[in-house]
Amino acid sequence: MARVDGTGPYFAVGDGYALYRGAVGAGGAHRHAAFQVAVAVDGEVAMDDASGVRHRGAALVVPPMVEHRLLPSRDLRTFFIEPHCRFADGLRTFGGSGLVVAPGLRGLREADVRPGGARPSRDLDGRLLAAMRTLLDEPMPLPDVAARVGLSPQRLRALARAELGMPLARWRIWRRLARSAEALRAGDALAVAAHAGGFADQAHFTREMRRMMGMTPAEAVRALRPSAAPGRVDGDGAVDG
């Protein structure tokens, strides 16, 4: 893995965030279950929203579950900020339900995100935070999680939609993708990474990653391990279609 201030790609997963630094190719429209902050290392970053409107700026903020397409760039710092962490509270102050140009975030670095990523949100209901911590630790059905935090399943679902902007099931898949992405970064094979995230198989992992990140596991591997030959990343080429 290259240094974050070096010339190669860099990928890190920390408490409450993930960071990718490097080139970004053409991808499809997708939605993250996290805030995205895309920062241009030089020039501007550009994205299209669900209506096809193009947004450009030194930095762009995308709220959770907002559909967008990131345009190719030679060098970006792309942060994925978990909605339940303290750093996300500051991103919520931008308001709105779409892409936001945020020039004040041009200088954002991993060291700026790390402290707030490790602390819980002040904005979210404490019972929702407790439910999310439970889901991180245990594979538990939602009704059992709701009972543990003193809510009905219906109230917990409503709280998640109101405060996170998504169902907990979507956030749970995002967290599984984060575990699989960390396995890829560590050099694990795609099948092993899929298992690490609890996906049924490699094809399931690929579908969810394309839907929520706009890229496939094979594309992520080639970005993080440039020596990986196209079409020879654990046979994933047959899945990418």
Image (cartoon, rainbow, N blue to C red):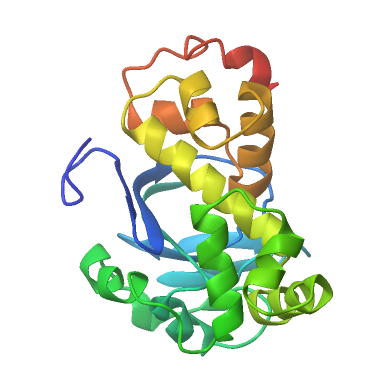
Name the side, left or right, on which 27 lies relative to 106: right
Residue at the limit of the structure toward the right, as seen here: 154
Q: Quadrant of the C terminus?
A: top right
Image quadrant in which you'd find residue 68: bottom right
In the rendered view, tell whether residue 210 sits above or below residue 192. Answer: below
Instruction: Give the number of marks.
Output: 0
> Which residue occupies 61% across, 77% down?
128
> Which residue occupies 76% across, 63% down?
143
x then y, percent, for residue 60: 49, 70
In the rendered view, tell whether residue 141 sits above or below residue 166. Answer: above
Name the side, left or right, on which 185 lies relative to 129: left
Image quadrant in which you'd find residue 107: bottom left
Q: Quick check: can you spot residue 71?
A: no
Name the side, left or right, on which 170 lies relative to 154: left
> Which residue occupies 70% across, 71% down?
147
Comparing 147 with 9, the one in front is 147
Comparing 56 with 151, the one in front is 151
In the rendered view, tell whether residue 179 sits above or below residue 46. Answer: above
> Which residue occupies 34% across, 34% down?
185
x then y, percent, for residue 201: 64, 23
Comparing 104 with 152, the one in front is 152
Comparing 110 with 59, the one in front is 110
